[in-house]
Every structure is written in structure tokens, then in C-alpha cells.
Image: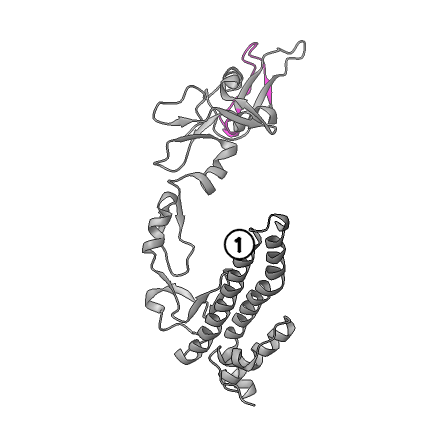
Amino acid sequence: MAPLLLKPSAKRKATTTVVVHEEPYSIKGFESSMYDIRCFICLGWDQGDMSRLVCNAPVQRCQCRVYICTSHTLDPRFESYCVTCKKPASTVPDPTATALLRSTALVECTSPQCPELITMDDLETHLLSQCPFNLIRCDKPGCPVRYARKDRDAHARACKSISCRFALSAPDGAQLGCSWRGNRSEKYSHACPIGTPQRFGLIRGCYDYLMREIKARDDTIAALKETAGGFSGFRGLGICCERIMVGRDVAATKSLLSECGLLCADLNGLVALQGRTPSSLAVAASWSVAERRGLSLSKKQITGLGCEVSG
């Protein structure tokens, strides 16, 4: 639909300002300019480029300024002539008029139920991130549903895409265990790298242990900050304790959790190549990662991972 160069209907809401060359302007201030540069043929704008008619009279060129949509010049029936002296004329592209219309003329949102009127320059942004009625496709694998942006939360509750039963989500968003996600009908038939509840139990034990470690450190930080708050002369003590704990222990523990997640993806291959049991492999890997991160894991702590430690 052609942009509205006149007053918009009461059914749609129009913005009051536009941005031209990074400066906000009132739409009302452009009304006269928009009227002057509207197309001489269709009395509007087809959302394409604008051109200007230039009189080719050899003696004295007329000083008229007539604009037309460039698309009209492509019509074989189009005849270019001066509207003042009726002499032959030529068409010249006018990027200034095009830019003014794109930043000022109001167009209806292409979403059928959306009441907004926006400029052409803002239409793409409006559709991609703002329009509540624009249909978007669910980004979860295995779900073909398209829904209006305003219904995102409702669809999330009814989405048919599910995760594998051997999946965990770390606090930083990393996926532990099996990362598969898809349609419910494929839940038990996909190629799962974990495969058995026994192996997932090992991962779950590692996850639970590390979550307890993180919580213990967070509780320690909270207790130190609360204690430091009672000393008026040492107000910075709580902040210092938090920087030390987060910078050295909590960050290291979360990193350990993330690296343990990488073990899950290649668990089957490593077991086959090295001939080890999943339990002994996890013990060796946990010790190796802990040493690189400067953490000291005792045999008792390793046992808390659900692994058996010998020697």
C-alpha cells in the first residue's frame, strides 16, 4: 500500500517524530515538503526512488520542479514533457527527495493486525524487533510453529520441542550431557552420546557436587559481606572478599564445570580408545582439570562425584 502523505486514519497510531540525518524532527514540519514532492502522476509514492523532471527547452528552461516515481519512467507509455511549456523534458534521479520520503512518509505495518504507522526507514526494525503481531518461527529444533511475537511466552509453555532426558543446563548457559533438542516423537530414537542412565548418573553426580561447591562459596561471600557491614571502618572488606572469592574460587569452579561438560560429548569414543571404564576416566579427567585450575581435589571429594577411587 502506498505511503500516507496526508493525515492518517483514526484506526492507526502515527509516530510524532522522525529521524533525518541523526536528528529528530516533527512530522508536521514536513507536511508541506511532502506535499510538494509527491508524484505528479499517482499523487503519492510507490516506496521506490523519486526522480525530477527537467525541461529541455533550448532557449529558456522552465523553473518548475515536478517529481515522479522513478518506476513510472519504466512504463513504455510514459512520455517525458514539461508540465509548464509542454516541451520535451528529461528525468533526473533525486536522492534527496527519496531520502526525505523514506524518513517521513508513513506506511502501514505489513502485519495485518498491527495498527502502527511507521516510516520506511523504520519498517524493517519494527518488524524484526518491535511489532507484536509479526509472525516469527519458533527457534527450537523440531518445532515448525509460527506465532505472533506477543504470544512468545504462551508458545514457550506449549512448545513441542523438548530436550534429551540426559541433559543438564549449567548456570552460565552451557549444555551438559546430551545437547540434543527436537520433536517429542524423536526423544528416544536420536543418537544420544550418553546412551545409558549409568553414564548420565556419573555426569549428574559431577554436576551436583560442583553446584554444592559453588553454593558454598556464594554463601561464604554473603556471610563475609554481612559480617563486614558491621564494621564502619572496614566498609570495603566485603567487596574485597567478593573479588577474591569470585576471581579465584567460584570462577575456577564454574570453569571446571564447563570443561567437565566437554567430556560428555566424547565419552563413548574415549572409553573405546583407552579401554577405561567411564568411572575411572571421569576421575582422571577431573583431577587433570582441577590441577590446571589450581584446585585441590582430595579422594573424598572425588568420591563425591559418584566415582570409585583406588590407590
Structural crowding at the residue carrying mark 1, measured as other residues with C-alpha within 10 Å and reported as few (<14), some (14–19) or many (≥20):
few
Residue 215 spot, x, y in % from top left: 49, 64
What's the magenta bit mostly, secondary-structure-wise?
A: loop
Residue 167 spot, x, y in % from top left: 43, 68
Front position in the image: 295 or 80: 295
Q: Left or right of 109: which side holds 61?
A: right
The residue positioned farthest toward the right in the image shown: 59
Residue 164, compared with residue 101, is above or below; it is below
Number of disc labels: 1
Q: Left or right of 188: which side holds 40?
A: right
Q: Left or right of 47: which side holds 56?
A: right
Residue 164, compared with residue 98, is above or below; it is below
The residue positioned farthest toward the bottom in the image shown: 311
The structure residue drawn at horizontal position 59% and vertical position 51%, both measured from the top left corner, is: 231
The structure residue drawn at horizontal position 36% and vertical position 56%, both measured from the top left corner, is: 144
* Callout 1: SS: helix
Q: Amino acid at mark 1?
A: Glu
Residue 246 spot, x, y in % from top left: 59, 60
**Is residue 70 visible to the viewer in this orientation of the structure?**
no
The residue that label 1 is drawn on is 226
Magenta segment boundaries in residue numbering: 69-91
- Assess whether residue 70 is covered by the magenta stretch: yes
**Is residue 225 visible to the viewer in this orientation of the structure?**
yes
Q: Quadrant of the C terminus?
A: bottom right
- Assess whether residue 134 is covered by the magenta stretch: no
Q: Quadrant of residue 184?
A: bottom left
Front position in the image: 149 or 259: 259
Front position in the image: 198 or 146: 198
Front position in the image: 169 or 70: 169
Looking at the picture, the colour scheme in use is: one colour
Residue 116, compared with residue 40, is above or below; it is below
The structure residue drawn at horizontal position 49% and vertical position 82%, both measured from the top left corner, is: 307
